Amino acid sequence: MLMLILTMLGCSSSSIEPIDGVELTWFGVTSWLVRYEDQSLLIDPFFSRPQLGVEGSTEAGIQTMNEMLESAGSSHVNAILVGHSHFDHAIDVGTAAIEANAQVYGSPTTCWIAQSQDLDAERCTTVAQGDTFSLGSATIHTIRTIHWNPEGFSGTYGEYTEEPDPTAIGWAPNGGTLSFLIEWPETGQSLFIQDSMGPLNGNDKSSEDYTENLEALFLERALTTVWLAPADFVDTSEEIGEYLSRIQPQWWLAHHWDGTAPDLAAGPPKDFVLPDFISSTAEQYDSTIVLPERYGQQFQLTEAGLEAK
């Protein structure tokens, strides 16, 4: 099993020189910067803090994004991947892509949001269940996965079919939740990014078979190196076991345990406790759970293992 060394990291210079391995930087909720070679991928851009249904992406939010990218050592973004279209994952998608001159990959609903923020239509690539594309040396597989609370208001499948009011996207539907498996064939390493989850057999009023989707993706694959996934979105050991038995992550780097609109300056909550049944179930599947300690914390995956940079 790979060795993990975690440290608190300070700011680094805004160089665009290629890096060795894969570097992960947490920006809160499910927003991450993934860097490898000369590629920088921004996951779920959420830096503005809107009043729900009133305000969309803000100048202050984009300024915060630029500051966090600089502190992470990156002055550019090649692509933006969006798991689903709720405000805490996609509210800055169009404005972030314009600012960073990046290509967006997400659902049609995500692309409608991006276009409402003045991003050209060709700058947003719609992806769906079973789609595969490449970015640098990485191959990225897309699958549909289920949202948290699938029978509830926020989890039921819904989508935009036209451009929305950009000031009201705080109430956007989820658009169909996507998860991304990023593989680096030369090293055999992989990163599975999942920004929400619920019981695989939940009924969200879509036609997706979420169990089949997950099984098809991981059926003939070896252990997943790192799984980025919510820390406490399922209710039983059986529900989380359905994921762990198929994904088989060596490391579960947990996110979205800090709420839906945390104060980035204040840092993540200090009183979060991982549910016992999640810890014990992960242990049964030889998966090590790691909670990031602060916003801007970095983890690096190299050929030698996952180490402090």
Image: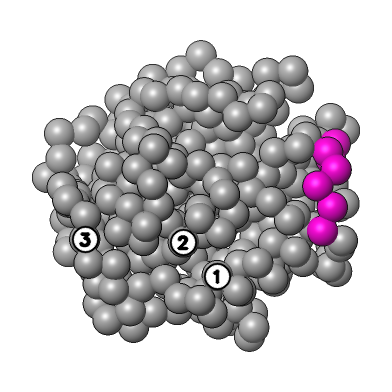
Marks 1 and 2 sit apart, C-alpha to C-alpha, by 7 Å
Q: CA distance from mark 3 to mark 2?
A: 15 Å
The amino acid beneath tag 1 is: Ile
Q: Which mark is residue 95?
A: 2
Out of 276 and 101, give the one closest to the viewer.
101
Mark closer to the chain start, 1 or 2 = 1
Mark positioned earlier in the residue sequence (3 or 2): 2
Q: Is residue 220 left or right of residue 24?
A: left
On screen, residue 35 versus residue 156, left or right, reads right
> How was this image coloured?
one colour
The residue tagged with tag 3: helix, strand or loop?
loop
Cβ atoms under marks 1 and 2 closer than 8 Å: yes
Q: Residue at x 21, y 33 (%)?
A: 208
Q: Residue 174: name its quadrant.
A: bottom left
Residue 132 percent across, percent down from the top left:
46, 23
Q: State how far apart marks 3 and 1 are (Cα).
A: 20 Å
Q: Position of residue 153 (x, y in %)?
A: 17, 64
Q: Which circle marks residue 164 in the picture?
A: 3
Q: Amino acid at mark 2?
A: Thr
Residue underneath mark 1:
62
Secondary structure of the residue carrying numbered label 1: helix
Q: Quadrant of residue 1?
A: top right
Vertical placement of residue 288 versus 39, above or below: below
Residue 288 lies, in percent from the top left, at: 66, 47
For the question of whether residue 289 can be seen, the reply is: no
Mark 3 Cα within 10 Å, few/some/many (few <14, many 20+)? some
